[in-house]
Image (cartoon, rainbow, N blue to C red):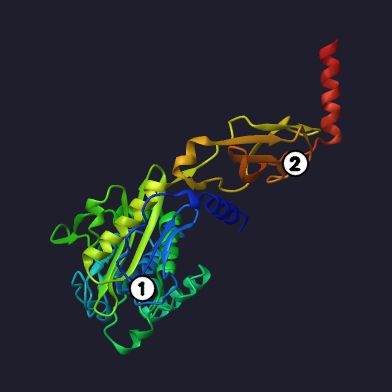
């Protein structure tokens, strides 16, 4: 929370000076968010709960990636298609009952072709049933603070009565998109594919997100469409170390969703940048009566700040350290401050803390030092 407060403060100080035209939004709701800090740069009706269609699969992919990254499943594990998975309509790769496919190919099919059958098969593989998986989706949404969200299925299909309550918002889509991109970067191996194949080259895949091909730096993420939801998109892109997430819901045409996200991303990249102050290598504090003579100082938190682009080159960072620290020194103990300024204005003050612990010298250690000094003096 302290880190977020710093980021919001900097944004509030600088936002008023942005001069570029506001992005053109063609949809019921939209948001532009910085992935590193979570700062919202543009918004329109961001908490309106709407049908998300296949953008739902951002959460499906998030739970899959969490299962992979914590070792519950592996990329080369075999997944078997059930009757329920094979019966899914809409976008699919036409799994047959009993057909097997690796987790890697399942994820590829979901990310690139929005395959409903693969999403269902993966849900069953991880949780035993789609219903049990959806419970996990809603639980994870609650953990992430997605208060506008209620999932009914893992696909976003809304062709039956139960799906009328399947809702989320542009804000919540940005939240889960950020979680997926920042904490599970391997997903980009799949969300950036333009064209590929599965089944040993026998079945072609083409990405439903056309920005992957046409927008420089695009890193994903997920399209969605049903008659009830309209055209939806969570689009992400990275340039000069800054990744942005643009979401639009309820656009009237496919072109509208792509043009809206392009306009949002263009606005963000034109006006904002991430500034990361550097603590010079070797910044350390002398330690008295310690088993080490000094301890390195490092920022307590992520020091990246979102700033107005025109100001980036005028920002300075100053390191102030304690003259010394007495052992024992605990890892994480405060040793100083990193002060970030724009001219005379302080943008952030980041605590600098001990990178490692330093134990206090024992009586035996002290006696040994004394004896060594005596021996060297003779």
Q: Secondary structure at mark 1?
A: helix
The answer to whether 30 is drawn above or below residue 365 in the figure is below
- Contact check, label 2 and label 1, Cβ < 8 Å: no
Where in the figure is residue 307, as x and y percent of width and height? 49, 46
- Answer with left or right where residue 178 lies relative to residue 105: right
Per the model, the C-alpha gap separating discs 2 and 1 is: 48 Å
Residue appearing at x 34%, y 72% in the figure: 28
- Residue farthest to the left? 202
Percent position of residue 99, x then y: 22, 71
Mark drawn on residue 123:
1
- Report x, y in % for residue 103: 31, 63
Looking at the image, is 230 positioned above or below residue 22? below
Q: Position of residue 92 (x, y in %)?
A: 21, 71
Identify the residue shown where x is 36% and y is 53%: 21
How would you rate the neighbour count of disc 1 (Cα within 10 Å): few for under 14, some for 14-19, many for 20 or more?
A: many
Place residue 95 in its image quadrant.
Answer: bottom left
Observer-nearest of 227 and 186: 227
What residue is at 68 percent from the left and 46 percent from the top? 332
Image quadrant occupied by the N terminus: bottom right
The quadrant holding residue 2 is: bottom right
Q: Which mark is on residue 329?
A: 2
Q: Nearer the viewer, residue 346 or 254?
A: 346
């Amino acid at each position: 929370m302290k880190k977020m407060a710093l980021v919001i403060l900097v944004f509030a100080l600088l936002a008023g000076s942005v001069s570029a035209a506001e992005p053109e939004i063609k949809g019921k709701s939209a948001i532009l968010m910085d992935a590193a800090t979570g700062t919202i740069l543009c918004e329109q009706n961001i908490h309106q709960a709407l049908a998300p269609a296949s953008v739902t699969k951002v959460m499906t992919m998030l739970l899959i990636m969490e299962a992979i990254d914590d070792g519950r499943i592996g990329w080369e594990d075999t997944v078997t298609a059930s009757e329920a998975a094979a019966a899914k309509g809409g976008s699919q790769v036409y799994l047959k009952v009993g057909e097997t496919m690796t987790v890697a190919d399942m994820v590829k099919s979901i990310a690139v072709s929005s395959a409903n059958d693969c999403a269902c098969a993966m849900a069953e593989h991880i949780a035993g049933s789609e219903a049990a998986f959806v419970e996990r989706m809603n639980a994870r949404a609650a953990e992430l603070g997605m208060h506008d969200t209620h999932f009914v299925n893992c696909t976003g299909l809304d062709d039956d009565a139960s799906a009328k309550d399947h809702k989320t918002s542009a804000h919540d889509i940005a939240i889960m998109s950020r979680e997926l991109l920042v904490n599970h970067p391997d997903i980009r191996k799949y969300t950036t594919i333009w064209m590929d194949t599965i089944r040993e080259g026998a079945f072609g895949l083409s990405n439903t997100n056309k920005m992957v091909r046409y927008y420089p730096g695009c890193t994903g993420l997920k399209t969605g469409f049903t008659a009830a939801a309209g055209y939806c998109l969570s689009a992400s892109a990275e340039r000069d170390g800054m990744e942005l997430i643009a979401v639009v819901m309820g656009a009237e045409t496919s072109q509208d969703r792509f043009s809206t996200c392009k306009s949002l991303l263009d606005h963000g990249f034109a006006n904002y940048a991430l500034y990361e102050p550097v603590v010079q290598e070797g910044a350390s504090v002398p330690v008295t009566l310690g088993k080490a003579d000094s301890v390195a100082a490092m920022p307590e938190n992520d020091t990246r700040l979102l700033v107005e682009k025109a100001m980036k080159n005028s920002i300075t960072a100053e390191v102030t350290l304690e003259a010394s620290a007495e052992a024992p020194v605990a890892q994480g103990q405060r040793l100083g401050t990193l002060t970030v300024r724009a001219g005379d204005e302080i943008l952030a003050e980041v605590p600098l803390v001990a990178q490692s612990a330093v134990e206090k010298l024992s009586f035996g250690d002290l006696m040994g030092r004394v004896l060594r000094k005596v021996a060297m003096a003779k």
